Image (spheres, grey):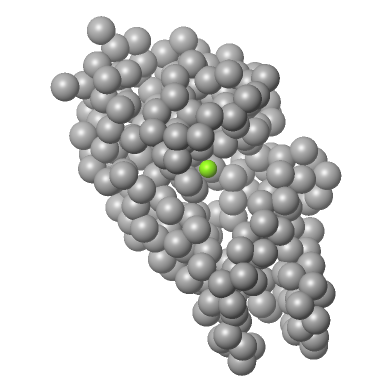
């Protein structure tokens, strides 16, 4: 018997392979400034970017500071000068929204769940970028609605983000809502604080000790079928 009627899906690192899109976008933007980015620089960018998103979740930087600050920091480290960072950041966002790669046949998983549960996207990111990838991938079409932090005005894990989602979805009984995501600091922490059930997706299988304990842990999205009682 399935207790859940509603799934809130994280996108990056859960339904879509963010690192794939990121690598494509940063490589493309470096070429347009006449440079070839190295694998090491991509790794470094990824770290800097993760740091900025964590600081955004903590309210230490604004979204605007994140969009350009990560590149300012990268360029500074590698002594890359005379770049129009605003234009670079803009091109990066567009490139990021133009390619996608699924994790675990995620589209098929969501299609299988269609009609059995209501599904919504809850994602931190820029509206144009996230909508672009969700439309292209076909995921937008299987979702009942999309909640993107730029539109909501605050990111996960903030209570205000989840209050906004709760006000706009059909299910009002919190015990029937499950959030599925790969991030302890935004998805699991946010879900717990909002009083809904949480499912931590960790494909690498690496358990981390945290004060925020998810109700479920899965390493493959298909494992959700068991949790939801879908055969
Ligand atoms: Mg994620």
Instruction: Please provide percent x and percent y for residue 99.
Output: 41, 66
Q: Nearer the viewer, residue 79 or 115?
A: 79
Q: Quadrant of the N terminus?
A: top left
Q: Nearer the viewer, residue 166 or 228?
A: 228
Q: Quadrant of the C terminus?
A: top left
Residue at coordinates 63% horizontally, 25% vertically from top-left?
209
Instruction: Please provide percent x and percent y for residue 51.
Output: 72, 51
Q: Is residue 174 visible?
A: yes
Residue at coordinates 67% horizontally, 20% vertically from top-left?
211
Left or right, residue 49 beside residue 128: right
Residue found farthest to the left? 231
User: Above or below — where is 183 with respect to 88?
Assistant: above
Left or right, residue 151 beside residue 83: left
User: Above or below — where is 196 with respect to 222?
Assistant: above
Residue at coordinates 58% horizontally, 14% vertically from top-left?
195
- Number of callouts: 0
Based on the displayed image, in which of its 4 quarters is residue 42 positioned?
A: bottom right
Residue at coordinates 51% horizontally, 34% vertically from top-left?
206
Instruction: Please provide percent x and percent y for residue 38.
Output: 59, 77
Q: Is residue 114 visible?
A: no
Q: Nearer the viewer, residue 166 or 231?
A: 231
Instruction: Please provide percent x and percent y for residue 6.
Output: 38, 23
Left or right, residue 7 beside residue 215: left
Based on the displayed image, in which of its 4 quarters is residue 74 positioned?
A: bottom right
């Amino acid at each position: 018997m399935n207790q859940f009627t509603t799934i809130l899906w994280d996108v990056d690192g859960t339904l879509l392979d963010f690192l794939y899109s990121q690598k494509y976008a940063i490589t493309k933007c470096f070429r347009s400034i006449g440079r070839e980015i190295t694998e090491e620089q991509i790794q470094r960018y990824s770290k800097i970017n993760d740091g900025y998103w964590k600081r955004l979740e903590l309210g230490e930087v604004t979204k605007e500071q994140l969009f350009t600050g990560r590149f300012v920091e990268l360029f500074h480290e590698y002594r890359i000068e005379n770049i129009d960072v605003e234009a670079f950041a803009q091109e990066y966002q567009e490139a990021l929204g133009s390619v996608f790669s699924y994790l675990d046949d995620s589209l098929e998983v969501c299609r299988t769940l269609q009609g059995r549960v209501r599904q919504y996207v809850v994602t931190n990111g820029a509206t144009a970028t996230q909508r672009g990838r969700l439309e292209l991938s076909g995921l937008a079409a299987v979702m009942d609605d999309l909640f993107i932090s730029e539109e909501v005005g605050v990111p996960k894990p903030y209570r205000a983000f989840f209050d906004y989602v709760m006000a706009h979805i059909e299910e009002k009984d919190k015990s029937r809502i499950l959030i599925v995501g790969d991030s302890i600091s935004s998805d699991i922490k946010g879900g717990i604080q909002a009083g809904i059930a949480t499912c931590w997706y960790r494909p690498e299988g690496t358990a981390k000790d945290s004060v925020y304990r998810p109700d479920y842990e899965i390493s493959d999205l298909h494992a959700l079928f068991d949790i939801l009682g879908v055969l």
